[in-house]
Image (spheres, rainbow, N blue to C red):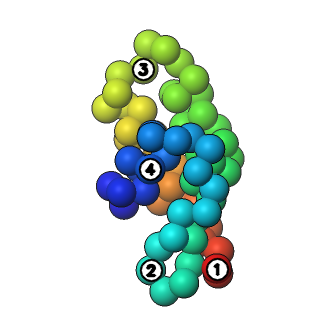
């Protein structure tokens, strides 16, 4: 999970992020599709910790795709 959050924070355009068992996550779509995460990340006053938590929540709630 931490690696996926790090990958998104390094490049918010990350689409196909591989996870176990031949599945992947579209990290950019996961965050864009989570309204509050998008708002937190767009707010320049949000702390780095809050941005990381919002990214993590969006990724946890995202649906995986069979690669």
Say if mark 1 contacts mark 2, CB within 8 Å: no
Task: Give me the C-alpha separation between circle 2 and circle 3.
Answer: 31 Å
Are the residues tagged 1 and 3 within 8 Å (C-beta)?
A: no
Q: Is 3 situated above or below 36? A: below
Given residues 10 and 33, the one toward you in this image is 10
Q: Which of marks 4 and 3 is in front?
A: 4
Residue 58 drawn at (x, y percent): 52, 50
Q: How far apart are marks 4 and 3 (CA)?
A: 19 Å
Task: Please tell me whether mark 1 sits on a helix, a strand or a loop.
Answer: loop
Left or right side of 51 for 64 = right
The residue carrying mark 2 is 20
- Residue with the mark numbered 3: 46
Q: Quadrant of the C terminus?
A: bottom right
Instruction: Specify the quadrant of the image occupied by residue 35.
Output: top right
**Crowding at mark 2 (Cα within 10 Å: few <14, some 14-19, many 20+):** few
Q: In this view, does 51 lie above or below 6?
A: above
Which residue is depicted at the point 52% across and 29% down? 41
Q: Position of residue 7 (x, y in %)?
A: 44, 50
Q: Can residue 30 be seen at all in this image of the molecule? A: no
Q: Which of marks 1 and 3 is nearer the N terminus?
A: 3
Q: Residue 6 at x, y = what percent?
A: 38, 47
The disc, 2 or 4, on the residue closer to the chain's N-terminal end is 4
Q: How far apart are marks 2 and 4 (CA)?
A: 16 Å
Foreground mark, 1 or 3? Answer: 1
Q: Mark 4 points at which residue?
A: 7
Q: Closer to the camera, 23 or 54? A: 23
Quadrant (top left, top right, bottom left, bottom right) of the N terminus:
bottom left
Secondary element at tag 3:
loop
């Amino acid at each position: 999970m931490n690696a996926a959050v790090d990958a998104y924070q390094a490049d918010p355009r990350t689409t196909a992020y591989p996870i176990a068992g031949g599945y992947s996550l579209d990290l950019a779509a996961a965050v864009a599709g989570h309204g509050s995460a998008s708002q937190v990340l767009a707010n320049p006053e949000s702390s780095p910790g809050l941005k990381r938590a919002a990214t993590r929540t969006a990724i946890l709630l995202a649906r995986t795709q069979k690669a």
